[in-house]
Amino acid sequence: MKLVRISLLVACALAAPLAMGQNTAKIKIGLMLPYTGTYAALGNAIENGFRLYVEEKGGKIAGREVEYVKVDDESDPSKATDNVNKLVKRDNVDVLVGTVHSGVAMAMAKVAKDTGTLLIIPNAGADAVTGPMCAPNIFRSSFSSYQPAYAMGEVAAKKGGKKAVTITHKYAAGDESVRAFREAFEKNGGQVIKDLNLPFPSVEYQALLTEIASLKPDLVYTFFAGGAAVKFVKDYAAAGLKKSIPLYGAGFLTDGTLDAQGADAEGLFTTLHYADSLGTPRDNSFRLAYAKTYKLQPDVYAVQGYDAAQILGIGATAVKGDLSKKAEFATAVEAAKIDSPRGVFTLSKAHNPVQDIYLRQVVGKENKVMGVAIKALADPARGCRM
Ligand code: BEZ
C-alpha cells in the first residue's frame, strides 16, 4: 500500500512539471511544404511568411518559443501519408502547417482528422478539406479552389465572352477550379465548350495549344501555378494565341511568376484574394518588412504563410499556449477578425477564409488591383458537417 502511494506520488511529481511544461516548452511546428519541383518557390514563400510573423512576435507564439521540423513533400501525393505520419508519430509535432498541392493536403487532412493533430493549410485549395473532410482541428489560411475560379467565371461572362475552353493540370485543384469557373460562367450566360488537361506536373503544352487554336473559343480559362504557370504563359504567347484569344486565370497564373514571365504576362486578367498594389497601411508594412527580411517581394503565398502563423497565434494565445485545448483554440479562431495584408477576413464555420476576391491585371511587374470581383466570398463548404 505504502509502495503504491509512493509510486503514485512519484508519478504525480513527474506529471506535474510536464503538464505545466506544456505551456513553456517550445512549440513544435511541422512544416510540410514543397521545397523542390514545380511548386518549390511557393513552399519557400509560405515558410518565409510564416517565420516573418513569428519573428515579429519575438520568435514566440503565445509566449512559447518555436521549433520547426521541415519536410520536403515534393508535391507528391504518393509520399504524403508517410511524410505526415513521420511528423505526427515520430517527431510529435504540436501542429502541422502544410501544404501547397491539394492531393498532398488531402492526405495531411486525413491524418490530422484521424489523430486530432492541429492542421493549418497555408495554400492548397482542395474543396474537400473544408468540405466533406472538415474538422474542428483543421483550418485554412488561404482559399478554396472554388473562390478565385467562381469569381473569374462571373468576370469573364460579364466581359462578354460566350464560349470558353479551360485548361489545367488533372488533379483536385485543377478540376475544382475549372468546375467553379464553369458554374459561374454558365450561370451568367456563357458556355464551356471543352475542358483540356494534362497530368501534373507535365508542362508539355504544345498539343493542347494547337487544339485551342483550332477550337477558336472567345476566351481561355486556366489554373496553373509556380513553374508550370511561367511556362504556360510563355508558351501561350509564343504560340501566337495571346493576340487572338484572351487568357484568364485564377491568380496563381501570375503570382510570384512575373519576373520570369516578363512581357508575355503583360495585360493578363486574373482573380485572387491578394494583389500587389492594395496600398493599405497593413499591406504596405507587411511588404516592407518582407522585402527587408528576404530581399524579395512578397506574393500571395507569403501572405498565406504569414496568416497561417497569425491563426496559430490567435488560437494559441486564447489557450495560453496549451495546444491540447483544441475546442477553445477553435472557438477563438472562429471568432477572430484576422488582420491580413490581403484585408481583414474571418473564417467560415468550415474554417475557410471568407474574403474579398480581387480582379487584377498585370502591369509591368505587378498584379494591379482593378477592383473587387466579389466581396466577402464564402466557400459553399459542400459536404461539411461540423
Ligand atoms: C493546389 O494544389 O491546391 C494549388 C497549388 C498551387 C497554387 C494554388 C493551389
Image (cartoon, grey):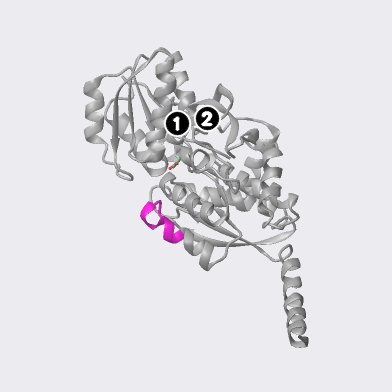
* Residue contact at pointers 1 and 2, CB within 8 angstroms: no
**Does residue 24 appear left or right of residue 51 in this picture?**
right
The residue sitting at 67% across, 64% down in the picture is: 26
Total numbered badges shown on the rendered structure:
2
Q: Residue 34: x, y in percent?
A: 45, 53
Whether the magenta-drawn stretch holds residue 329 is answered as no
Instruction: Rate crowding at label 1 as few (under 14), some (14 to 19) or many (20 or more) other CA atoms within 10 Å.
Output: many
Q: Is residue 292 above or below residue 188?
A: below
Mark 1 element type: strand
Q: Residue 356: x, y in percent?
A: 59, 28
As drawn, the residue found furthest toward the bottom would be: 3
The residue sitting at 37% across, 30% down in the picture is: 222
For the record, the magenta segment spans 74-83
Residue 267 visible within the image: yes
Q: Is mark 1 within 8 Å of ligand 1?
A: yes
Quarter containing the N terminus: bottom right
* CA distance separating discs 1 and 2: 18 Å
Mark 2 element type: loop
Q: Residue 60: x, y in percent?
A: 70, 57
Which residue position holds label 1? 250
The residue sitting at 52% across, 32% down in the picture is: 366
Residue type, mark 1 in image = Ala
Q: Nearer the viewer, residue 312 or 344?
A: 312
Instruction: Rate crowding at label 2 as few (under 14), some (14 to 19) or many (20 or more) other CA atoms within 10 Å.
Output: some
Which residue position holds label 2? 380
Query: In the picture, residue 265 is in which quadrant?
Result: top left
Q: Main secondary structure of the magenta part?
A: helix
